[in-house]
């Protein structure tokens, strides 16, 4: 990837896979806009990237779990003339808890962040990208998009939306000069498990992929023109195999091994 002269916006850039996206895009020469809620973390990462890669890095603190978050991020970037050539919709979280026990506020925040803000950002930025006949959008879903996920029911369903939405959009965008791709990570080293309240047995941790590897798979797929990619060989085999598994058994597998 030679991204000199381009600018990338990375959501969820204060930890995990988002940090890796930002570093790898900067390494390819792109200027970067980092966004998440934890501003100090973003400032520290911005400083590190400037030193290591000599590119321009801006920080926009923003809460995309709120209904006005995506508009605020737009206003702070394209809306004021800061052209975004690569949009990485990475911010997201899940909570391991039975649906009926979770407060509506928490479920709303999750859907707002994982689906609604992602869709609004994709809408706003894709419209100007199509006018410019150039742009790349990577939406981060999950292997949870491939099956029902008991105890994270709305999370997995939301990620299925992200996958179908992105693949449909990618088809629509054929011939416009704009590309969209969905990355479906499997278990990846980040703060995701802690935030979700997942209690991981040590054998499960052995199966985790590094955030760097996951981000690299996503960026490579995006710039090669893929519409969807599952991170890693074994995750891909697993998701392919699910085609032949009855849905109730898939739900049992997710309930047992998540
Ligand atoms: N790690 C995995 O095993 C895994 C597997 C499948 C899919 N994924 C997906 O990968 C993506 C990245 O997650 P990760 O694994 O890197 O987890 P992470 O380390 O917890 O990072 C999540 C990022 O999202 C940001 N975020 C959370 N709530 C936000 C809000 N309301 N507004 C704005 N930003 C918010 C966080 O920043 P602040 O807290 O500073 O706002 C953080 O930067 C997510 O979409 C996740 O669903 C992860």
Image (cartoon, rainbow, N blue to C red):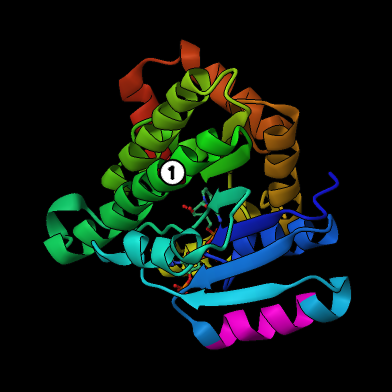
Q: Determine the image quadrant of residue 254.
A: top left
Is 46 contained in the magenta span?
Answer: yes
Figure quadrant of the N terminus: top right
Q: Residues within 10 Å of mark 1 (few under 14, many from 20)?
A: many
Residue 197 seen in the current view? no
- Label 1: state its secondary structure: helix
Whole-percent x, y for residue 5 in the image: 78, 55
79 or 74: nearer the viewer: 79
**Badge 1 residue CB within 8 Å of ligand 1:** no
**Which residue is rendered at x = 79% and y = 78% of the image?**
50
Lateral position of residue 25 relative to residue 8, left or right: right
Residue at numbered disc 1: 122
The residue located at (39%, 41%) in the rendering is 123
65 left or right of 139 in image = left
- The total number of labels drawn is 1
Residue 112: say if magenta: no
Does 127 sit above or below residue 36?
A: above
Question: Where residue 11 appears, x then y in whole percent?
Answer: 52, 61
> What residue do we see at 30% from left, 49% from top?
116
Q: Is residue 235 visible?
A: yes
Q: x and y percent of residue 67 in the render?
A: 23, 61
Residue in the foreground of this view, choosing between 109 and 94: 109
Is residue 172 positioned above or below 123 on the image?
above
Rendered position, 158 above or below 169? below
Chain part drawn in magenta: 40-49
Residue 202 x/y as whole percent: 62, 61
Magenta: main secondary structure equals helix
Farthest residue to the top: give it: 244
Horizontal relation, residue 203 to residue 163: left or right:
right
Q: Which residue is drawn at 53% across and 62% down?
A: 81
């Amino acid at each position: 990837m030679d991204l000199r002269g381009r600018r990338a916006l990375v959501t969820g850039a204060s930890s995990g896979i988002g940090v890796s996206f930002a570093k790898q895009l900067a390494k390819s020469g792109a200027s970067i806009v980092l966004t998440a809620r934890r501003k100090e973390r973003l400032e520290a990462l911005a400083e590190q990237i400037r030193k290591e890669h000599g590119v321009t890095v801006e920080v926009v603190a923003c809460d995309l779990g709120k209904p006005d978050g995506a508009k605020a991020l737009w206003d702070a970037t394209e809306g004021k003339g800061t052209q975004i050539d690569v949009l990485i919709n990475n911010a997201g979280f899940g909570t391991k808890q039975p649906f009926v026990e979770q407060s509506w506020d928490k479920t709303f925040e999750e859907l707002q962040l994982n689906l609604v803000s992602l869709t609004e950002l994709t809408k706003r930025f894709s419209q100007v990208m199509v006018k410019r006949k150039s742009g790349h959008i990577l939406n981060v879903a999950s292997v949870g998009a491939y099956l029902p996920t008991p105890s994270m029911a709305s999370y997995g369903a939301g990620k299925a939306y992200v996958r179908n939405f992105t693949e449909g959009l990618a088809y629509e965008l054929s011939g416009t000069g704009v590309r969209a791709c969905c990355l479906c990570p499997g278990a990846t080293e980040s703060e995701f498990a802690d935030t979700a309240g997942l209690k991981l047995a040590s054998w499960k941790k052995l199966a985790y992929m590094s955030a760097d590897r996951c981000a690299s798979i996503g960026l490579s797929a995006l710039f090669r023109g893929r519409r969807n990619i599952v991170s890693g060989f074994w995750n891909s085999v697993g998701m392919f195999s699910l085609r032949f598994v009855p849905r109730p058994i898939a739900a049992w597998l997710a309930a047992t091994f998540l």
